[in-house]
């Protein structure tokens, strides 16, 4: 019998996050910018303690991550992601500090090799590790998939158990050389 633990998550290159409409497009953008290790993040001159999978800053930063100009649209997206169970967030009305925590965060790396770098991940660089079953929650709630949701569902279900694919958990951190027969 196969070890199913091996295939619980897949890797998605941050340089090709899904574009277009869909709640998982927003999730991927937020997850790709969260802290990859515990530390202190600096945002607009403020120091914020963060845990892996967390982001702390202001609504302006949130709008930038989500690629929207509207504060209400950004907060509406956060509310929808929260209601679906993809993240938790809080907004301090007095200080305007917003924090979010990705609930499906995959932690397999301590970040020890990157201790001199920034706490937050860099947009477009490296990989976002995501649970293979991330789209199941949408299906269970009879959510109508939009283009980005369908793209991520396809990615998760075509990559997750392919030992020749560098984006499956099986090939975690090692370069893969495909041998064509």
Image (spheres, helix red, strand yellow):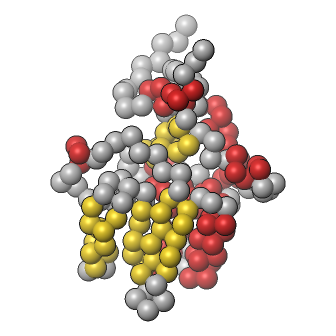
Compared with 177, 71 (above or below) is below
**Image quadrant containing the N terminus:** top right
Q: Quadrant of residue 121?
A: bottom left
Query: How many numbered marks, from 0 up?
Result: 0
Relative depth, front residue between 156 and 50: 50
**Residue, x 28% and y 72% (percent of image)?**
42
Q: Position of residue 74 (x, y in %)?
A: 58, 75
**Image quadrant containing the C terminus:** top right
Q: Residue furthest top?
A: 181
**Residue, x 49% and y 39% (percent of image)?**
11
| Side of 49 where 89 appears, left or right | right
**Residue, x 31% and y 73% (percent of image)?**
48
Q: Position of residue 49 (x, y in %)?
A: 30, 68
Q: Position of residue 20 (x, y in %)?
A: 65, 58
Q: Position of residue 129 (x, y in %)?
A: 47, 44
Q: Residue furthest bottom?
A: 94
Is residue 29 in view from this perspective? no
Compared with 21, 72 (above or below) is below
């Amino acid at each position: 019998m196969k070890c199913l633990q091996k295939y619980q998550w897949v890797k998605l290159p941050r340089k090709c996050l899904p574009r277009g409409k869909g709640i998982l497009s927003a999730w991927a953008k937020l997850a790709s910018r969260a802290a990859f290790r515990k530390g202190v993040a600096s945002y607009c001159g403020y120091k914020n303690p963060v845990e892996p999978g967390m982001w702390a800053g202001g609504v302006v930063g949130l709008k930038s991550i989500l690629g929207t100009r509207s504060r209400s649209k950004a907060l509406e997206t956060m509310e929808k992601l929260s209601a679906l169970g993809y993240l938790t967030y809080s907004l301090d009305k007095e200080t305007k500090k917003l924090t979010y925590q990705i609930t499906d965060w995959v932690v397999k790396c301590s970040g020890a090799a990157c201790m001199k770098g920034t706490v937050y991940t860099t947009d477009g660089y490296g990989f976002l590790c995501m649970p293979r079953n991330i789209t199941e929650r949408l299906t269970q709630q009879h959510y109508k998939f939009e283009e980005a949701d369908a793209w991520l569902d396809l990615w998760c279900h075509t990559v997750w158990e392919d030992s020749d694919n560098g984006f499956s958990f099986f090939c975690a951190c090692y370069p893969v050389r495909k041998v064509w027969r």
